[in-house]
Image (cartoon, rainbow, N blue to C red):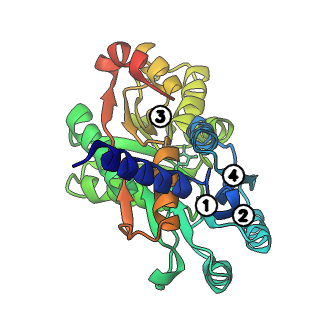
Amino acid sequence: MNPIRILAIAAAVAGAALGAAGQDQPGGKKVRVGFAQIGAESDWRKANTESIKSEAAARGVDLKFSDAQQKQENQIKAIRAFVAQGVDVIAFSPVVETGWEPVLKECKRAGIPVILTDRAVDTQDPSLYVTFIGADFVEEGRRAANWVVKAVGSSANIAELQGTPGSAPAIDRKKGFEEVIKAHPGLKITKSQSGEFTRAKGKEVMESFLKSPEGKQINVLFAHNDDMALGAIQAIEEAGLKPGVDIKIVSIDAVRAAFEAMIAGKLNCTVECNPLLGPQLFDAVEAVMAKKELPRRIVTKESVFEQSGAAATIKDRKY
Ligand code: AHR
């Protein structure tokens, strides 16, 4: 083919990509994306926010970002404000699973596509969102339980720190964990309560577990995220016990602070949940703007990290 024609095709392809990215929309307008974030409850969430903001900036997207401070009503208000502003795409990470249909129908009536990231919504109507990008939380729960079976054996008194009540990760991680341990009748969850995905609440709830009549028998802790495990570690130390030794601990996320705790011997295992969803989110936004088909579900790839490999791996952690 004539080299000039090749260059012309390449320029056209690049131009189309730029248009989709928002730097060169018809009329020179940027793509406007409204993102309704849950809050800043954990190191995971802070890394997730940073990934979304930096990827939007790198692609020249006009990002309207809102922080709901853990309240569903604030997320709904933010989504309504995005509809009123007429953004091109709305994305959000739903704090809880239920109660979204009315506002999602408003987005649909306004013709604004919705992308879910990180957490799912409970709806029977598949037309209310385009795609859901995020981890498989049930599988994360299974991975945590498989680690318990491997490391502790088939008999243990397990304390569980659950995430935000009604949230997809709290529901699904519990489900996956219980699915695996039910094959081992000696593995018993003797205490289980929400620590709201925060360090402060994780510490407070672990203190109450340890003071309870079953407290002395606890020898495993399963925390639905690293932040709660890190709070619980303080409570265990203050009770005169050795976290990671007297009580084996497995949690989820694989944030840097969890690696530091593993290197210090205080946390035994962390199951990865990748918060760096910005690139996948804006790839999906570009596809939506270009009217391309997207898979209904985009699952992120994740691993499991144990104490023994933590010192060698921490340098590669990006969050
Ligand atoms: O939805 C993902 C969960 O939310 C993370 O595991 C937790 O740390 C966060 O707050």
Q: Earlier in the sequence, mark 2 or mark 4?
A: 4
Image quarter of residue 212: top right
Three-letter residue code for mark 1: Phe
Q: Earlier in the sequence, mark 4 or mark 1?
A: 4
| Residue plotted at (20% across, 36% down) | 150
| Residue 312 locus on image (x, y percent) | 33, 13
Work out whether 206 lies above or below 190: above
Residue with the mark numbered 1? 92
Locate residue 150 relative to residue 242 in the image: left or right.
left
Work out whether 53 lies above or below 15: above
Q: CA distance from mark 2 to mark 4?
A: 16 Å
Q: Nearer the viewer, residue 70 or 91?
A: 91
Indicate if the residue with disc 4 has its beta carbon within 8 Å of ligand 1: no
Image quarter of residue 47: top right
Q: CA distance from mark 1 to mark 3?
A: 42 Å
Residue with the mark numbered 4? 63
Image quarter of residue 138: bottom left
| Residue 162 locus on image (x, y percent) | 52, 51
Q: Which mark is residue 75?
A: 2
Residue with the mark numbered 3? 216
Three-letter residue code for mark 3: Lys
As helix, strand or loop, the secondary structure at mark 3 comes to: helix
Camera-side mark, 1 or 3: 1
